[in-house]
């Protein structure tokens, strides 16, 4: 299905990675420079079109969907400059995280923390609040030192703590509502080694000892397998090295067969015959064995994710994590739900970003997933009821049903963000149905 633009070009429907969001823009542009991006926005404004950059479509919400101008970021990539004295790197906004990580490693540098996949563009990742897990180090957005924002009239605003600080506070996680980011300056540090320790642990043990596990490790996360009392835990801590990556056989078995290939098969079976899921879960939860390995950060933090799914994730106050998770487990056990994906738990320290899910409070993240094509509404609705009862804040790029009234209560600085939006984009050129729901109009 395609539509024809005024220039005679035909644009195909755009779909996100999970396949649950489709958009039909009337025009596409792939700018090769900031000047071309500014010109495209000015033309869209003149033509009365709304505009959105797409990134790589890894959001599960319609944050990037547009019926107007679709801005593809493929040519706005690469490192602009590295300032070793300041400890920063400035990168074009369309650069995929995987290319940034590899390029930094070649220069002997690294981000301090990152999420568990690296397919996203840097601007897409920060705009929705992509995060990993950390006791002291926070989301990717919290590692930004400056950014350039192209506004609706094509003006480029350079933003930092000293220059346009009110825009900087919001645009580090702006959900695409304030403009189009063209460049980002990240804090970086000399590359270091992380030692990962993965091991099985019971649900009761990991929840009863969570505070200690969080306090004793720089990066702690775990996965609980629904229909079981089993978890797998991962602790990442800095070490002096030497490099000791997983052996080829171990990496192939754990990352390719169990986490992708076999996982794809069992999810396909579970979707066709839901009654098999609890039994499969008991086997799957015991299949991953303990292992320890050491490598540079992006090779430890991130891993391939080729099994497609839909996801909901909420940040709750860290002190409320254990109670929230126990309620989630009890809900699954008394329901008829059949859940084939593990529940992921991570943490982040408080930050000062206006609409960050960790804004102003130490946070814990609980992510629930369902295999693509499997009905997810009943599970997500029941989970969301629990999350919101604990003052949860949904990830901006993952499925949720909350609206502006909820966020006005959940975020003390919500009105600050919407007032800035009114100033930078009064005509809602960067608006869409999703932003109307979550920010109001």
Image: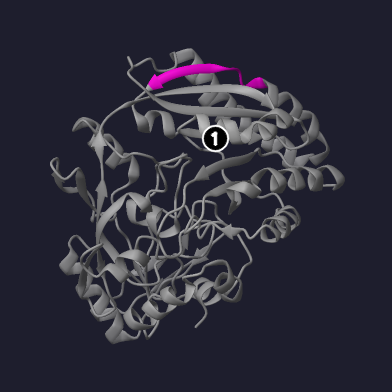
Q: Is mark 1 on a helix, strand or loop?
A: helix
Task: Give the residue at x 56% y 44%.
Answer: 308
Task: Give the residue at x 52% y 26%.
Answer: 256
Dividing the picture into quadrants, the one containing residue 262 is top right
Closer to us: 231 or 121: 231
Q: Where is residue 370 in the image (x, y as percent from the top left)?
A: 66, 46
Task: Give the residue at x 76% y 30%.
Answer: 229
Q: Does the magenta stretch include residue 289?
A: yes
Q: Is residue 104 left or right of residue 226?
A: left
Up the image or down, 32 lies above or below 253; here it is below
Pointer 1 residue: 214
Q: Is residue 264 visible in this depiction of the protein? A: no
Closer to us: 398 or 387: 387
Q: Where is residue 118 in the image (x, y as percent from the top left)?
A: 40, 42
Q: In this view, does 92 lie to the left or right of 225?
A: left
Q: Where is residue 51 in the image (x, y as percent from the top left)?
A: 36, 73
Q: Is residue 160 magenta?
A: no
Dividing the picture into quadrants, the one containing residue 106 is top left
Q: Position of residue 430 (x, y in %)?
A: 38, 75
Q: How is the image coloured?
A: one colour
The residues colored magenta run 287-294
Task: Give the residue at x 34% y 44%.
Answer: 97
Closer to us: 379 or 36: 379
């Amino acid at each position: 299905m395609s539509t024809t633009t005024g220039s005679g070009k035909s644009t195909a429907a755009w779909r996100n990675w999970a396949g649950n969001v489709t958009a039909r823009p009337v025009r596409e542009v792939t700018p090769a420079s900031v000047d071309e991006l500014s010109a495209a926005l000015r033309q869209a404004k003149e033509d009365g079109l709304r505009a959105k950059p797409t990134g790589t479509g890894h959001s599960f919400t319609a944050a990037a969907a547009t019926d107007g101008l679709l801005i593809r970021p493929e040519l706005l990539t690469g490192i602009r400059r590295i300032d070793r004295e300041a400890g920063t790197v400035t990168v074009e906004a369309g650069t995929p995280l995987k290319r940034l990580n590899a390029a930094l490693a070649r220069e002997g540098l690294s981000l301090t923390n990152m999420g568990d996949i690296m397919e996203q563009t840097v601007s897409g990742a920060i705009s929705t609040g992509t995060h990993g897990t950390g006791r002291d180090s926070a989301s990717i957005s919290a590692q930004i030192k400056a950014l350039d924002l192209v506004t609706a009239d094509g003006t480029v605003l350079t933003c930092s703590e000293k220059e346009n600080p009110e825009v900087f506070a919001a645009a580090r996680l702006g959900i695409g509502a304030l403009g189009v980011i063209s460049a980002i300056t990240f804090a970086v540090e000399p590359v270091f080694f992380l030692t990962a320790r993965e091991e099985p642990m019971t649900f009761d043990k990991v929840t009863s000892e969570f505070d200690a596990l969080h306090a004793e490790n720089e990066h702690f996360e775990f996965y609980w397998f629904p229909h079981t009392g089993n978890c797998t835990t991962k602790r990442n801590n800095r070490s002096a090295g030497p490099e000791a990556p997983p052996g080829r056989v171990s990496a192939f078995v754990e990352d390719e067969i169990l986490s992708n290939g076999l996982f794809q098969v069992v999810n396909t079976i579970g979707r066709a015959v839901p009654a098999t899921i609890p039994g499969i879960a008991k086997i799957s939860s015991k299949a991953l064995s303990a292992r320890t390995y050491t490598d540079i950060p992006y090779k430890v933090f991130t891993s391939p994710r080729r099994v497609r799914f839909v996801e909901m994730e909420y940040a709750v106050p860290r002190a409320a994590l254990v109670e929230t998770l126990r309620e989630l487990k009890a809900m699954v056990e008394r329901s008829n739900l059949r859940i084939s994906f593990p529940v992921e738990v991570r943490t982040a320290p408080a930050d000062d970003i206006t609409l960050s899910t960790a804004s102003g409070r130490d946070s814990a993240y609980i992510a629930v997933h369902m295999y693509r094509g499997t009905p997810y509404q009943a599970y997500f609705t029941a989970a969301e009821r629990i999350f919101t009862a604990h003052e949860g804040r949904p990830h901006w790029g993952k499925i949720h049903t909350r609206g502006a009234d909820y966020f006005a209560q959940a975020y003390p600085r919500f009105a600050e963000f919407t007032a800035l939006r009114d100033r930078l984009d009064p005509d809602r050129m960067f608006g869409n149905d999703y932003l109307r729901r979550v920010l109001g109009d």
